[in-house]
């Protein structure tokens, strides 16, 4: 029997794309022949996105659910919220900008049916600007180095997760999180497929340079303490260089006399390097402990749900056969 599907879509100021997005998602899910739901998480939109979500929830009955957050919490917190309100045995995440076609969902589900816990995607002929692609390349390499899982496009939100992986993600309580990294850390079998990438049809990207930098900083501080460890290594290396420089100065002073050392200025440099290195080592070690404490004690809520529309008492019971019943009922009336 085919597993049920929850499609989770974070939404932020996407009023111009929502009607087409939901229509295409419903059509793509109908074609799969399995129970499904579409969960739209509005991340504090300031345009008419909420009204469009409410209209689609009414149009498609229990198949489309809207979850409204009281303010903007960021894309990945919105995804976590969607995962928490998803009931499917498989969860597929998707951006709301239509750059990744919903028609690709069927290919991800085919891989899930083969037994993979996480199915990632790689955007082919990516339509983003160089300003978007360079930080994405850096993030991909940083994540692969930290997790050891070789995936080539962590920035693509079109991904499929098994329910066991989703439940493990939801048990993680840290506030700053990156869903694909968490998923890969819990998965036993991962794979990735190439997917088509379209130009944005309407609206503008919500990831400017400042938000990309914030995302990179969150990644460095939430998934690893490597930057702090690098500070410790740098301090140790600088201390060793200072000691070596001091030994070199002592040897040259003995060989060439006190005039060679420029009246102690070079010696002062060596002492400063040693002290600076020791300080960096101490800061790195202190930061290592503080970073681990920070990771353990973060228990603040990731988001606050204002209200939910389109929820039904019976979850994921809709199937394509129900569509025929709806048509017959409509014709009868």
Image (cartoon, grey):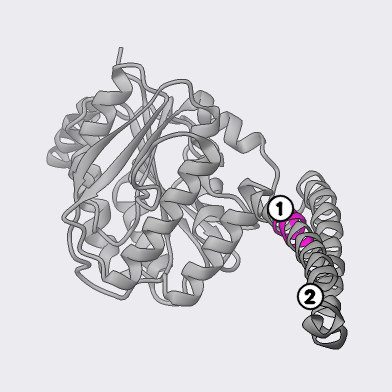
Q: Position of residue 86 (x, y in %)?
A: 48, 37
Q: Is residue 281 above or below residue 114?
A: below
Q: Quadrant of residue 70?
A: bottom right
Q: Which mark is residue 308?
A: none
Q: Position of residue 250 (x, y in %)?
A: 84, 67
Q: Is residue 270 above or below residue 288?
A: below
Decide: few, some or many residues near mark 1? Use Cα within 10 Å; few <14, some 14-19, many ≥20.
Answer: some
Which residue is found at the position 50% from the left and 43% from the top? 145
- Please indicate whether residue 4 sits to the left or right of residue 332 in the image: right
Q: Is residue 306 visible?
A: no
Which residue sits furthest top?
1
Which circle, 1 or 2, is nearer the viewer? 2
What stretch of residues is rendered in magenta? 232-239
Residue behind mark 2? 256
Which residue is found at the position 26% from the left and 65% from the top? 17
Q: Which mark is residue 233?
A: 1
Identify the secondary structure beneath mark 2. helix
Q: Nearer the viewer, residue 299 or 217?
A: 217
In magenta stretch: residue 102: no
């Amino acid at each position: 029997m085919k597993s049920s599907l929850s499609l989770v879509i974070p939404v932020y100021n996407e009023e111009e794309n929502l009607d087409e997005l939901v229509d295409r998602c419903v059509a793509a899910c109908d074609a799969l022949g399995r129970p499904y739901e579409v969960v739209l998480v509005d991340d504090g939109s300031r345009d008419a996105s909420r009204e469009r979500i409410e209209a689609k929830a009414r149009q498609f009955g229990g198949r489309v659910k809207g979850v409204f957050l009281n303010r903007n919490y960021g894309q990945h917190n919105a995804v976590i919220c969607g995962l928490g309100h998803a009931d499917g045995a498989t969860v597929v995440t998707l951006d709301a900008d239509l750059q990744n076609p919903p028609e690709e969902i069927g290919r991800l589900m085919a891989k899930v049916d083969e037994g993979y816990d996480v199915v990632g995607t790689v955007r082919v002929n990516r339509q983003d600007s160089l300003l978007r692609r360079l930080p994405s390349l850096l993030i991909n390499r940083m994540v692969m180095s930290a997790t050891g899982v070789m995936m080539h496009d962590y920035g693509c939100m079109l991904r499929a997760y098994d329910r066991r992986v989703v439940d493990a993600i939801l048990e993680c309580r840290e506030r700053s999180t990156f869903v694909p990294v968490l998923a890969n850390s819990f998965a036993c079998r991962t794979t990735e497929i190439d997917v088509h990438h379209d130009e944005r049809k309407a609206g503008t990207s919500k990831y400017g340079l400042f938000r990309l930098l914030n995302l990179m900083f969150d990644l460095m501080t939430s998934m690893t303490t490597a930057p702090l460890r690098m500070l410790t290594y740098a301090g140790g290396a600088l201390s060793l260089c200072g000691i070596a420089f001091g030994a070199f100065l002592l040897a040259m002073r003995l060989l060439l006399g006190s005039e060679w050392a420029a009246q102690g200025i070079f010696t002062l440099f060596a002492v400063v390097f040693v002290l600076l290195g020791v300080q960096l080592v101490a800061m790195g070690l202190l930061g290592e402990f503080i970073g681990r404490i920070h990771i353990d004690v973060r228990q603040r809520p990731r988001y606050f749900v204002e209200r939910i529309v389109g929820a039904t008492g019976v979850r994921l019971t809709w199937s394509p056969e129900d569509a025929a019943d709806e048509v017959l009922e409509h014709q009868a009336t």
